[in-house]
Image (tube, rainbow, N blue to C red):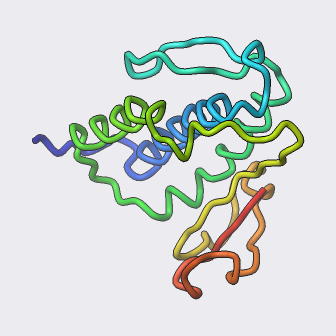
Amino acid sequence: MRIIQIENGAGETARILVEFLEVAITSIVFLKGIYPPGAFERRKYMNLVVHSARHPELRDYIHSAVSGLHPFIQKSYGSRVEEADLEFSLRSFFIKLPFSESLTRVLPQDCRWEITAYFQSLPQASTSKDAELWIPTDTQQGQQPPLITPIKS
């Protein structure tokens, strides 16, 4: 297993994880049946077929929400990444996703959904306009007491 030093350090790791989250959230929204299948198109990501939102507002909402996570994720990761492990883990998620019973159960048509993220700490100053979409919420929403600070868009 080779360990690589990413040129921009934690920023590049965060970018990869934000891109992954965008594809993962879109795939979950597709599998949950929240929108009709025609609202999505098939695309390749990491040499796997995934679903991408065709509707601009849905695509932009997911993109801006996860892009706003970049400074939070960047603060959480160092500059060294085990490339093989990261790629294997991300690909494994997409391979297993369609078979996850709890995630593939279709929701009622009148349901609502949101993106919620949990972090141990927040960055000091936000340098991203997208990060302003995220606000700290009540820690009682999480299962664990304030070891993490939940934020949501």
Quadrant location, the N terminus: top left
- Location of residue 139 in the rendering, given as x and y in whole percent from the top left corner: 68, 81
Q: Quadrant of residue 93?
A: top left
Against 61, residue 145 (above or below) is below
Farthest residue to the right: give it.
110
Identify which residue, 12 or 137, lies in the foreground.
Answer: 137
Tell me how many marks there are. Answer: 0
Q: Is residue 101 left or right of residue 71?
A: left
- Location of residue 62 in the rendering, given as x and y in whole percent from the top left corner: 72, 38
Q: Is residue 78 left or right of residue 64?
A: left
Against 142, residue 28 (above or below) is above
Residue at 56%, 42% in the rendered image: 103
Identify which residue, 91 or 97, lies in the foreground.
Answer: 97
Identify which residue, 5 or 38, lies in the foreground.
Answer: 38
- Location of residue 147 in the rendering, given as x and y in whole percent from the top left corner: 52, 84
- Location of residue 58 in the rendering, given as x and y in whole percent from the top left corner: 80, 30
Q: Is residue 29 left or right of residue 90?
A: right
Quadrant location, the C terminus: bottom right
Against 63, residue 5 (above or below) is below
Residue at 75%, 80% in the rendered image: 138
Residue at 41%, 18% in the rendered image: 48
Q: Quadrant of residue 107?
A: top right
Residue at 61%, 39% in the rendered image: 105
